[in-house]
Amino acid sequence: MFLRLITSVLALMVLMMVITSGNDLAWLVLVSILLWFSFTEWGAFVRFNPIESKFFAAFGVFSFYSVHSKLEAIEYIPTILSISVFFWVCLVPFILKGGLKSLIQEKYLCAFIGWCVLLAAAIAMSYMKLVSVSLLVSVLLITIIADVFAYVFGKLFGSKKLAEHISPGKTWAGVYGAILSVLAFNLFIVLYGPVVFQFSEFDKTWHMLVFKAWPLPIFIIWSIVMVVVGIMGDLFESMLKRQAHIKDSGKMLPGHGGILDRIDAHIAVLPMAALLAWVPIPA
């Protein structure tokens, strides 16, 4: 537990320093490292050999660079993000219930899915950072808060399992804790944030952009949907590990396992968050 906490704090510090530094090269290096390990770990899910995994990772990083270099001019970015959202919202629930097995059992099809969702998440991050650092940070905080309180509520009150055949540690108490904590955080930001947080980029946080575009009841619904999608991302990664007979996706992060063990919920949430808060990239 202590090692897990230390790793989380250090990783978060590095991430926030790079995001807020304004150094585009540092950002590209960080995302490239995350993608390299993520694609390599996904390669293990589909039982690629080491050479295949490295080729898969190199192709994934190259794909990201190809899109990132023209991000401001590419008009079909929303389409890429929408495909990822469709997968997480419409297909993953069926996969988790035992349907559409071919999507994850067929080696190259599952690899293609990994390429799509990892690339979409990386594009969503870069898009939000270009719009405003506040937008990206606020989205990351939502998923982090959901993850922390799901863990706490699960440990304190968890008894009824969410999906024991996929991830025995997940509980319904954790789900309720994640939803309640994110709702409390999001409502605090939109109702009291303008008074408490008086900085120039506050109006570009995910909360304010979405709150301005939708009435409060819909904003609440979107907040809940974000949490649920993040949980599905977590469960889907657990299903892939179980299918591959792997306990952890890797060994990169002490106390957590691999990169995908840490960012599974973010992968699912980021494209949806970017679409909900979609605004043109500043010139």
Image: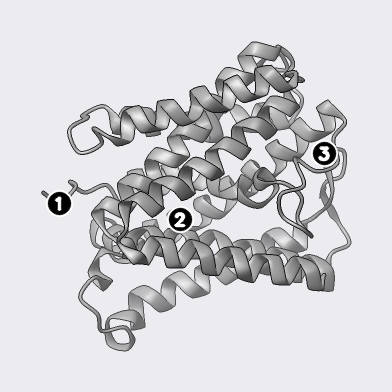
State the mark number for residue 263.
none
Residue 228, image x and y in percent? 59, 50
Q: How many numbered tags mark residues here?
A: 3
Q: Is residue 194 above or below residue 115?
A: below
Q: Which amino acid, mark 1?
A: Pro
Residue 272, image x and y in percent? 42, 43
Mark 1 or mark 2, which is nearer the start of the sequence? 2
Q: Which residue is mark 1?
A: 282
Label 3 packing within 10 angstroms: few (<14), some (14-19), many (20+): some
Q: Which amino acid, mark 3?
A: Ile
Mark closer to the observer (1, 3): 1
> For the residue labelled by badge 1, is the local secondary structure a helix, a strand or a loop?
loop
Q: Which residue is mark 3?
A: 166
Mark 3 or mark 1, which is nearer the start of the sequence? 3
Task: For the residues labelled 2 and 1, say whether their Cβ atoms are less than 8 Å apart.
Answer: no
Residue at horizontal 66 percent and vertical 27 percent from the top: 94
State the mark number for residue 221.
2
Q: CA distance from mark 2 to mark 1?
A: 28 Å
| Residue 68 visible in rendering | yes
> For the residue labelled by badge 2, is the local secondary structure a helix, a strand or a loop?
helix
Q: Which amino acid, mark 2?
A: Ile
Q: Residue furthest bottom?
A: 196
Mark closer to the observer (2, 1): 1
Label 2 packing within 10 angstroms: few (<14), some (14-19), many (20+): few
Image quadrant occupied by the N terminus:
bottom right
Mark 2 or mark 3, which is nearer the start of the sequence? 3
Residue at horizontal 69 percent and vertical 36 percent from the top: 236
Residue 109, image x and y in percent? 62, 13
Residue at horizontal 24 percent and vertical 62 percent from the top: 212
Mark closer to the observer (3, 2): 3
Label 1 packing within 10 angstroms: few (<14), some (14-19), many (20+): few
Task: For the residues labelled 1 and 3, say whether their Cβ atoms are less than 8 Å apart.
Answer: no
